[in-house]
Image (cartoon, coloured by chain):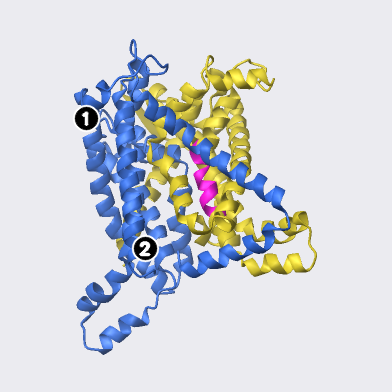
Chain colours: A blue, B yellow
Amino acid sequence: MTTQAVTDMASPGRTLRGTFKLGDLALRVVAGLVLVYLFVPILVIIVFSFNKPKGKFNYTWQGFTWENWANPFKYPALAEALRLSLNVAAVSTAIALVLGTLVAIALVRQRFRGSKVVDTFLVLPLTSPEVVMGASLLTLFLSLGWATGYVTILIAHVAFEISFIAMTVRARIRGFDWTLEDASLDLGAGPVRTFFKVTLPLVVPGIVAAAMLSFALSLDDFIITYFVSGSTVTYPLYVNAATKAAVPPQINVLATAILLISLVLLVGGTLYRSKKAPI
Amino acid sequence: MILPALAYLGVFYVVPFYSLLRTSLSTMGGSVYLPTLTFAWDFGNYGQALTEYREQILRSFGYALTATVFCLLLAFPLAYVIAFKAGRFKNLLLGLVILPFFVTFLIRTIAWKTILADDGWVVDALGAVGLLPSEGRLLSTSWGVIGGLTYNWVIFMILPLYVALEKIDPRLLEASRDLYATNRRMFGKVILPLAMPGVLAGSLLVFIPAVGDFINADYLGSTKTTMIGNVIQKQFLVVKDYPVAAAMSFVLMAFILAGVLLYTRALGTEDLV
């Protein structure tokens, strides 16, 4: 976000404020309420991480305790599921990052024959319902006779992450001045050196954003994973199974912890970016 | 540079669809434990899918459409305020909007189960003002499912809307003001048309995951609120009637594909992410 955009945006508010104060206030109140609405379930999750549930389910408030936070990994299966999910998210994002970024750079820099078709093709996985993607991958694995498990989960996650990454990176790097590359080549840097010294630094902020998005999507994915996981249990799959048998408050503890870590990364990222020159 | 990704998507996106299509036209044989699929151009699976699960198909589209409209109604004021009125708090507000979605989708849905519980304060409050649906509860009703669908994907409406609104040149608003446009006319003639790409992209991004979802119907609904996703999931993973399940998936995909291709034809792919 450039400062120019912010100042541009500030001005109509000033000129219009006097003309319809009441409507303006109502609008802000409604927007505030919507924001509160977004956080209602989150507050419930945080509050219930301190619950001392009687019985197996953590749906009604029973009393305050620190115990769940003291033993976040009390259930080994939950810890193991989370560890597996983090592993899948990291590995699949690394693979999809390479494939997706290359496509994004190619799409932005070269208008080649059929680039429009490639564009539409890349969007399709984003717009396929997860249940259909999961089902179609399952029929493939079934017909190939592959046992579903870690590898098939990885394959499926890379498949939906590539498009997300390609689209995100593409959105961030559109409008860059690619003649800088020519300049670098003119000045005697080789293509490899140019790639690492010029191209990569230009696209890195976009890549980081895309990687974070992809990681979060992978960690969160339930539906596709549900189809291709076999007996392997990821974090969302553990949560789903738990709701059928027993929901320990540690689920809320870990969810809250993940939220806090995301918050730190988000704030850290914003501060880092605002310190560097705006791109 | 594009070849590795295209090859990957070819093998793990296009080929699976081919195998799904093949499955949807196959006949099941063998025993329950060792089913065999024989490709037979068996369009009967489609007939069965469309007649037996007509109710679920219609319900899914109804729910997803309602949720999309709700998302639009919720997202517009928030996106508008962030784009035009937030000043230096713009980035902070955007961050706050995204933050809840870092909690696993499943856990958020479970939280709604607690919030909408029969003895919870939401049901009490709605009951007090007489807005409770005729069932006298929210959980296990259509409204519970639609509420869950709305909440889980509203972010996909807020962000594209914000992007579209943010692009509007404020001088256009000043100009319409100078030309004596009323608030309503300025909204209808300037803001809304310019926000349309965001509205369309957001609607697509909400509608698609909503129409294929089975989690919200599973957690917040009852056996009377099952959707296409529930049928596909159950047929594939529990009943293991692969051909009919594959046919269902294809019907769903065909509708959505038609919509997406129309959209990208008209507006390109830029606004979708």
Give how far across and how far down residue A261 sits, in percent. Answer: 29, 43
Residue type at mark 2? Ser
Q: How dense is the environment of label 1, judged by Cα within 10 Å: few (below 14), some, or many (20 and up)? A: some
Q: Which residue is mark 1?
A: A79
* Side of B1 where B86 appears, left or right: right
The dominant secondary structure in magenta is helix
Find numbered disc 2 in the image and state the secondary structure of the residue it sits on: helix
**Residue beneath the point at 35% across and 54% down:** A162
Mark 1 falls within which chain? A
Give how far across and how far down residue A20 sits, in percent. Answer: 72, 54
**Residue beneath the point at 33% across and 10% down:** A55
* Side of A155 where B205 appears, left or right: right
Q: Quadrant of residue A263?
A: top left
Give how far across and how far down residue A91 sits, in percent. Answer: 23, 48
Tell me which label, 2 or 1, sits earlier in the chain.
1
Q: Which residues are magenta?
A: B152-161
Residue A147 appears in view: no
* Side of A177 where B193 appears, left or right: right
Image position of B236 with respect to B196: above or below = above
Label number found at residue B214: none
Viewer-nearest of discs 2 and 1: 2
* Side of B109 where A184 appears, left or right: left
**Residue beneath the point at 64% across and 16% down:** B135
Q: Which residue is mark 2?
A: A274
